[in-house]
Image (spheres, rainbow, N blue to C red):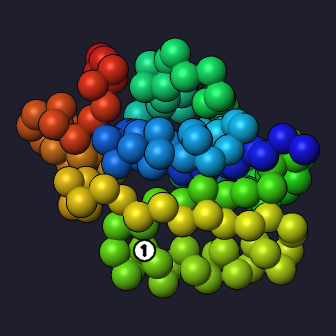
Amino acid sequence: MERIAVFPGSFDPITKGHEAVVKRAIPLFDKVVVAIGVNSTKSGFFPLEQRLTFLKQTFEGLPTVEVTQYSGLTINYCKGIGAQFLLRGLRNTADFNYEFTIASMNRQVGAVETVFLMTDPEFLAINSTVVRDIIRNGGDATPFLPNALQLP
């Protein structure tokens, strides 16, 4: 059976921390699906199509990484594509407390195991909210974004 992991998120925008988690997960799984969860009640800073382009730029040339989008419950998306694992990155204890609750619920609702990878130390302070604020206010966010990313 193919080991498929889904790395869900808004990726608004993707950061070097996200990129590092996916690259570290590649040897652990047969396929890593980086999936933008679409919430119809929220609009992102970057449009969905732009975020998909960013993800494709970032993971170009990595054949076991697939980029896609989904709507609805993440657990239902996982079941629909036959994914047995959810991939999550952790920066700190606050992330752990939040993710632990979701992982526990997902395990009860469906047979999906959550795999946590600790963020590399150099990326601990990076989060999409801060990166968006830098971009929104005309700052240089390139130190926090994947090198392959080409902002418009």
Q: Nearer the viewer, residue 96 or 138?
A: 96
Residue 108 coordinates in the image, percent (x, y): 83, 80
Q: Residues within 10 Å of mark 1 (few under 14, many from 20)?
A: few
Which residue is at 49% across, 25% downward? 59
| Closest to the observer, 133 or 84 | 84
**Residue found farthest to the left:** 139
Question: Left or right: 25 with respect to 80?
Answer: left
Instruction: Using residue 138 as the reference point, say whether residue 128 is left or right of it.
Output: right
Q: Quadrant location of residue 134? A: top left
Per the image, label 1 sits on a secondary structure element best described as helix
Q: Identify the image quadrant of the C terminus.
A: top left
Residue 98 vertical position relative to residue 11 in the rendered view, above or below: below
Compared with 42, 114 (above or below) is below
The spot of residue 133 in percent (x, y) is: 21, 49
Q: Tell me the amino acid under the disc marked 1.
A: Asp
Residue 104 higher or lower than 116, as above or below: below
In the displayed structure, 12 sits above or below 94; it is above
Residue at image coords 73%, 57%:
85
Residue at (24, 60) in percent of width and height: 121
Which image quadrant is residue 110 in?
A: bottom right
Residue 81 appears in the picture as rendered: yes
Given residues 1 and 43, the one toward you in this image is 1
Asked whether the viewer can see residue 41, the reply is no
Give me the residue at 54% from left, 60% from top. 88
Judge left or right: residue 54 versus residue 78.
left
Image quarter hosting the N terminus: top right
Can you identify the residue that label 1 sits on?
95
Residue projecting furthest to the front: 27
* Residue 36, position as x, y percentages in the image: 60, 42
